[in-house]
Image: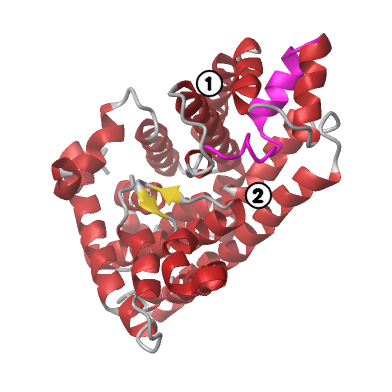
Amino acid sequence: MPVPSEQDLIRWQQQLEQSLAHYADTDLRQATARISHPAVHDAAAGYLIRPSKRLLGMAFLHAAHTLDLTDAGVDVAPEDLTAIATALEVRHGAILLHDDIVDGDTVRGGHPTAHHALEHSFGNEARSAALFAGDILAGLAPLPLLRSSLPARLRVRLTDLFQHTTALVAAGQTEQLDLDTRKGVLEVTEADILHVHGGQFGPYLLCSLQLAAALAGLDDTDIDRITRAGVPLCQGFQVQNDLAGYTELARVLGDGDTTDSTLTLANTSDLARRRRTVPARTALSKLTGPDRAQLADYLTGANMDLTDVCALMERAEVTPYCAALIRDLHAHTRDRITNDPVLPAPVRTALSSTCAYMTALYDPASPTSRLYLNARPDLQLA
């Protein structure tokens, strides 16, 4: 199959955006109809219609369109592909909603997070109400896939993959909490952190590739090979997310705004929360003497001005190191797939193309990273 054009990608995302908006106004509205306050629906719907590059849904659509689906022996309608992408994004919305509760973030994508938006209506029970809103999204997530016109046997297989990875994501998030609390900050290695990242972000990102591969008729052995090859890519995305959080935190502090609300924006709070991340681990490994001791004390719980913490990170030259690590991890996945002696050559070519697209989607210097703006005219007007 030919590599998708920019117009293909824009069209697919437009279809996905329309599907998510429809889902928010139908299934989600019906599921929340008995709740007396409409704020719960609106808070949950925000996670479906928020501005987003739709990494999970678009990765699936790219892979599914690039792989040769005729080997599966079924005729897959474009509407079914959009439905599966919708399921992936609804689940992602549920995970992000719960993640925001855990992290205490107040803003995501320029809009209040669910528990923050519900404070006016639910007061001290806002977090509980938001938790249930996330549960509603998680419960609804598989329905677009189950309602597709795919043959029953294929729907069962895809749903099995989909639901299994939902459980793995929750387990991976718990493993992150264990890493943050069980080991001393100086005992945690970069390998420890990357191992957790492989099970934290990996399952639901790799699910996009797994579902596309299953549609293409690949067996469990081949899907397992693709999954193992994709782990470094997922690790790279998580390091990229952590680095972006530190960069955004430094920018906010540099602007002179150190209010609590500013420091709880989504993606700025991992360092403020003393999480074991690769950027923090990198700084510890590069700093020496009093600087290293000061950062270790902060990450262990000592009070310290965040501006000074960011200054230590800057002194350790965290950004160039992490940027190079991200490139290496992404390249490692592409190399694993490209050189796999077992996967069929067309599959290797297609998935390598999808991995390159995923990398470009989150590369600020790539035109691909801005294509989502063409799929969302409302963002251009905002």
Q: Name the residue under label 2.
A: 199
Question: Looking at the picture, how far across and down is residue 62, in whole percent?
Answer: 32, 47
Q: In this view, does 327 lie above or below 106?
A: above
Tag 2 or tag 1, which sits nearer the N-term?
2
Question: Looking at the picture, how far across and down is residue 294, in whole percent?
Answer: 78, 20
Question: Looking at the picture, how far across and down is residue 277, in whole percent?
Answer: 67, 34
Q: Name the residue under label 1.
A: 323
Q: In this view, does 118 lie above or below 376?
A: below
**Residue at left offset 63%, top offset 10%:** 315
Query: Which one is in front in this view, the residue at disc 1 or the one at disc 2?
Result: 1
The quarter in which the C terminus is drawn is top left
**Residue at left offset 26%, top offset 28%:** 367
Question: Does dot 1 land on a helix, a strand or a loop?
Answer: helix
User: In which image quadrant can residue 346 be found?
Assistant: top left
The quarter in which the N terminus is drawn is top left
Stretch in magenta: 268-288
Q: Which amino acid does label 1 sit on?
A: Ala
In the picture, measured across the screen, residue 354 lies left or right of residue 176, that is: left
